[in-house]
Image (cartoon, grey):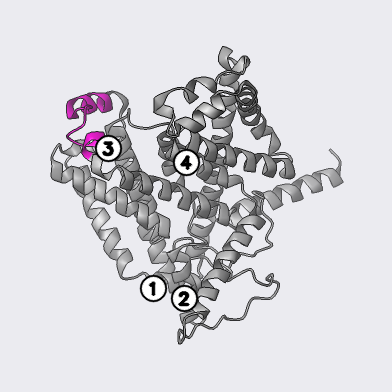
Amino acid sequence: MSAPAADRLTAAAARALGKATGRALGPYQSAVIRIGFSATWLLFLLREFPNRRELYGPGGPWSFDLAERLVAGNDAFTVLLWSDGVVWFEAVYALAVAASVMLLLGWHTRAASALFLVGVLSLQNRSVFMGDGGDNVIHLMAMYLVLTRCAQVWSLDARRGRAGGAGSAGAGAGAGAGAAGAGAGPVLWVLLGAVLMAAGGTGRLGVGWLGVFAVLWTAQGVWWLAERYDPRGEGRALLDVVANVIHNAGMLVIMAEVCLIYATAGWYKIQGSRWQDGTALYYPLNLDYFSPWPALSELLGASGVIVLLLSYGTVAVQVAFPFTLFNRRVKNVLLAVMMLEHAGIAVVLGLPFFSLAMIAADAVFLPTAFLVWVGGLGGRLRLRRASAVPGDGVVPGPRPAGASPGAGPLPGAGGDAGAPAAVPVAAPDTLR
């Protein structure tokens, strides 16, 4: 290899390494999937609240003994098998709801993501036959979200970080966020540590899961100490690099997972005779279970051309999607088509939570410019609503240089994210 070529290769490797370690990529995309999956799970839990004991609790057909036998064989994690009492079940269900709200709002997101993981795994592994496919996606994404810095924008942590950074001259956003969260953060950390020690001491957690939660708990404490006592030192810088690498790897896994879901679904459909002759959609349209709107299902199922086009179109979109990632424009068009397809599944087949989960997963590929525009639109609406209230005292502050007019306040990085104080609107992003 010639010297110029070697130099170019070295420079490219250095740029790639700097991008992977210098910042957490896709701040808006990670925020969208955080909001999307927490909202989907929260809506499901609230919708099924009257039926919670039959689905996951003591009153369900999948008994406590059957769940114990299954978990003993696959080593799945669920705290619902720590006790078969009604009070314990209600406490775990309430924890799942609270964790979903915390993650949705982005309040102490590192702890919230771990509690969200506990809630999802505990309920789903207690009764494995309850779900419509969307539960599997939520199951996977709950594990991946723990790895991401998904509160850099559109979160209470980000707002707390901006307020803390403004209030501590020269201390930096990270230190301000740590100080602002000094009340609830340590209390939450101590409580979770006590629960973890009790669970480990009584043998309720296996070695593997005990190690996972111990690492998460320790990292939470180390991060808080670095934010409070070493906001600009080498220790905080090292934590930032490690967190950026883990976040970027987690986002890459999420994208690969979405591509794998569509690729396997599409190629398996190709092997089915009903998909090959274009009649596959006809059968669910004529099942009462998948017909919340019988007149609409009958209208679609009565047209052979519509059934054929929808059946073939579904296969074509799913097979083609992973390959469209090499062309941004084609990917964006196909992404919109897939989201509309899932919205149609929610309405026509009566699978709203499956569709919401898939739309949330698709959101990882949304363009950054579009997400910034959506955030700016929300900011303008809030300012307009606030300005309509007399005496509210809301005065828009000056915008940073280079910010697009009307784009709303630039989101900063909270104490949870630990990123720079502002996310550049025009920053290069591999997730565009």
Whether 142 is drawn above or below 242: the answer is above
- Alpha carbons under labels 1 and 3: distance apart: 33 Å
Q: Which residues are magenta?
A: 53-72
Q: In the orientation shown, which residue stands out farthest toward the top? A: 273
Camera-nearest residue between 214 and 381:
381
> How far is the residue under mark 3 from the one under mark 4?
21 Å
- The amino acid marked with disc number 3 is Thr
**Which of the two labelled residues, at mark 1 and mark 3, occupies the earlier sequence position?**
3
Task: State whether residue 266 is above or below residue 253.
Answer: above
Q: Please tell me which of labels 2 and 3 falls first in the chain.
A: 3
Could you say where residue 273 lies in the image, as x and y percent from the top left? 58, 12
Q: Is residue 56 left or right of residue 375?
A: left
Q: Quadrant of residue 323?
A: top right
Whole-number angstrom distance, CA of label 2 to CA of label 3: 38 Å
- Name the residue located 25 percent from the left edge and 40 percent from the top edge: 52
Camera-side mark, 4 or 2: 4
Residue on which the image places disc 2: 163
Q: Is residue 54 magenta?
A: yes
Task: Tell me what residue is drawn at x 59 percent, y 53 percent.
Answer: 26
> Overall secondary structure of the magenta stretch?
helix
Residue 345 vs 422, above or below: the answer is: above
Disc 1 marks a residue whose amino acid type is Ala
Secondary structure found at label 4:
helix
Q: Which residue is mark 3?
A: 78
Which is nearer the N-term, disc 4 or disc 2? 2
The amino acid marked with disc number 4 is: Ala
Q: Tell me what residue is drawn at x 67 percent, y 49 percent.
A: 430
